[in-house]
Image: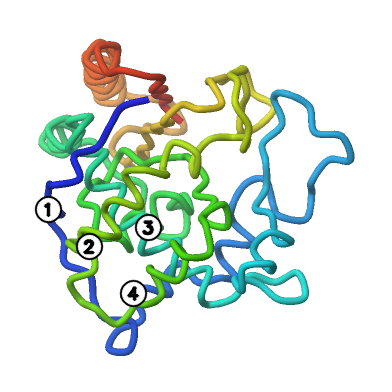
Amino acid sequence: MTSIDSSSTTPAQATPREVLPSLLQPTAEQIQNDTQPHYGVMPATLNPGDMIPISTDLAESKGLASNGQLNDDYATVQNMYRAILLPRLVQELDLAPYDQELAQDGIVATTGDSTPFYLYAQQCAGLPLDYFFFRNNVYVERLGQAQIDAFLAHANDPQFTTDQELIQIVTDTYPRIIRQDDEDGNFQTGFDTSSRRFYNDAIVIWLTTSISPDEMDNGRYTDLHKQRVALITDVVDRLEASLADVPGHVSLFWA
């Protein structure tokens, strides 16, 4: 697992919860309904390889849910956590140059209704990436009560992303907050029934793009599409080579 620099500053400034609704985007309902697997499909027997849903029981025990429903405090804490963690991972993994290269090559980003929930969530956090998104779930219900309270105490602070207490909490806890179980040990797992597998403690990055109309001719791919696929493949190969030098497990998928 890579480490993050607790002394660095985030490039994006968050907004106060009472002034703009950015800390409630995504909303608690979106987090509950769009986090995969859906919170209500916890298998009767959890086997290695099964994605772990948000624990509404644990969240409720810490004031982040009621009657099985996540509340605004859950959304606030998770969105604040993302806003501190994700820019630091982008910096540590050096993703921005690859994202910019795809834009310069004319690759079409996924937008609108087809935007994956996780890409939407990091855009709400001010992360300037259009093609790469972090696929990990963020299980803030695993934080200690004092840590949760610390986030909520700063929810009206427009400078919360530079608060050293919160930065230290994220630095100390994120390997456990994003992993696919809350126990020690490693195993291969996945987000769906596809062949894409990764370690349960990995930072998981997805690359997603759209096909533009000029890449299709009567339902068939044009030479332009083939050229763009080659460009993306080259970016993926170079990024994978770079990520191989990062300590810990980092997995990259082209969705």
- As drawn, 86 above or below 227: below
Crowding at dot 1, Cα within 10 Å, few <14 / some 14-19 / many 20+, comes out as: some
- The residue labelled by disc 2 is 161
Q: Residue furthest front?
A: 146
Distance from disc 1 to disc 4, alpha carbons, whole Å, reads 19 Å
**Pointer 4 and pointer 2: residues touching (CB < 8 Å)?**
no
- Out of 15 and 179, give the one closest to the viewer: 179
Q: For the residue marked with disc 4, what is the amino acid?
A: Ser
- Identify the residue at image location x=50%, y=27%: 201
Residue 154 relative to residue 91: left or right: right
- Disc number for residue 166: none
Q: Are marks 2 and 1 in contact (CB under 8 Å)?
A: yes
Q: Of the residues tagged 1 and 4, which is closer to the observer?
A: 1
Q: Label 1, secondary structure: give it.
A: loop
Kind of element beneath mark 3? helix
Question: Residue 22: which numbered mark, if any?
Answer: 4
The residue mark sitting in front, 4 or 3, is 3
The location of residue 198, given as percent across then percent down, is 53, 20
Distance between mark 4 and mark 3 Cα atoms: 13 Å
Nearest-to-viewer mark from 4 and 2: 2
Residue drawn at x 43%, y 25% is 253
Instruction: Give left or right: position of 79 versus 233.
Output: right
Q: CA distance from mark 3 to mark 1?
A: 14 Å
Residue 9 - label: 1
Q: Report which residue position mark 3 lands on.
A: 81
